[in-house]
Amino acid sequence: MYRQARYARSTIFELRGESDFCRTKVEGAVDLPEGMERGSRCLPELSEREVVKHYTNLSQMNFGVDNGFYPLGSCTMKYNPKYADALAALPQVTEMHPLQDEETCQGSLEVLYRLEKMLCAISGMDAVTLQPAAGAHGEFTGMLLARAYHEARGEKRTEVIVPDSAHGTNPASAAMAGFEVVEIPSGKDGLVDLESLRTALSERTAAFMITNPNTLGLFERKIQEVAALVHSQGALLYYDGANYNAILGKTSPGQMGFDIMHFNLHKTFATPHGGGGPGAGPVGVRRHLEKYLPSPRVVLEEGRYRWERELPDSIGKVRSFHGNFAVLLRAYAYILRNGADGLEAASERAVLNANYLCERIKAGYDVPFEGPRKHEFVASAKRQNKERGVRALDIAKLLLDEGMMAPTIYFPSLVEEALMIEPTETESKETLDEFADALLRIAAADAAAVKAAPKHTASARIDELYAAKELILTWKIRERKAGN
């Protein structure tokens, strides 16, 4: 794959340059403001063969769940089943328009209605909105719901508490919704420090945002005590659904005492993930928050489905139209295909895979904090960095030469030289052993060789600092500055 990908280093645009056609003036009048007209169409003159070869080689540069191991911690990069893609590609889905009459899309409305009920049953929530377009968008929606709830009660609550192991989107979502963010430290066991939480809580607290299991892969054993503390101050408990893949069929946010949560359908229910494409981050709430959910909502009356828009307490729309239907359909199909037993088995396999891999690599890496992991674990390259100057970043780079995607690195920040690994349930023991063997080889490898990696990818070792400062966001090739 990587040998073929090297072709892309010399693109067809470099080979051809700008042809005479690029300097041909566009004929005909244009109704554009002065200074915005395009004077030429700078397009290369290419044969069909060259175009096909170029884009085929570009496609082979991509690394994804379909062609390799993708242990990106906290992202749950599980395999996406193709039956769900086939359903989403049906003309009844792709050719439907969100403004068409309700009578002409009863089947689609039924899917949305039934998916909401399924997510309620799975999560222990009382109502769900499917509008949010991604997990972070769901967080933001949840914070808007919390704000609406407190304002309706005449309470001015200005703070949202997050643990130091929280996903970065948690404090960002709270801040975007107008709240001040209060961070609390984890305890020595990697779990929420109850005394720190008790100190941070006050009449100013609107919500406490947390995921369970947390980003270390540890289950918050005192979650009911956490819920009691939060509720005793009149605040709401928010569940970040990023790690839901670990608890399907075992417990639920509703059982733990959460008031609001978001789902990551791409993580838990295997819909496409990443690449800037469409996502879905439905939000579930308990009964006392239902009336604030975004509008419109699908309702069933006398055997017909329709959009209910008369919702006076709703926070309004958070997304154009009704959410990303094709992504929602994939999740609906995945849930139906697996059933309750299948979803529970998926979580069991995910937990088994994470703990097996964790034990396999302990001979070469430190794994801080005690206790069994759930869906993921965080190892540390602190020992390698101290003894040989090899960082987590260097290890991640060499894994690319092994033909595997690197895990998440340097997160969460409370683990030095963190390697955050999540194998998911879709990987075989053979794949896990290959990855463990690669990590152990790297742990014992020559430091200079590790620091020089990768050598076999389409691009070799990247100067990350330069790349971050000098972004190239166009296909036109620019010369690298001298000395960089």
Image (cartoon, helix red, strand yellow):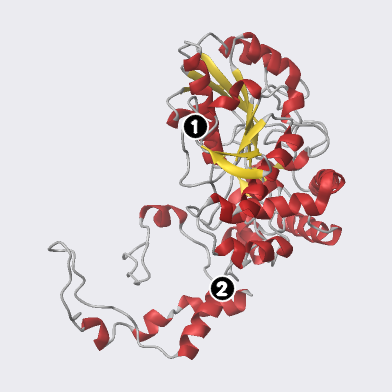
| Residue 415 sits above or below residue 257 on the image | below
| Residue 237 sits above or below residue 445 on the image | above
Q: Are marks 2 and 1 in contact (CB under 8 Å)?
A: no
Disc 2 versus disc 1: nearer the observer: 1
Can residue 402 be seen by looking at this rendering? no
Label 2 or label 1, whichever comes before in sequence order: 2
| Amino acid on which the number 2 mark rests in the picture | Ser
Residue 288 coordinates in the image, percent (x, y): 62, 20
Q: Which mark is residue 35?
A: none
Residues 244 and 75: in front is 244
- Residue visible at 20% across and 79% down in the picture: 26
Q: Secondary structure at mark 2?
A: helix
Residue 176 coordinates in the image, percent (x, y): 43, 32
- Which residue position holds label 1? 310
- Which residue position holds label 2? 59
- Residue visible at 50% across and 53% down in the picture: 98
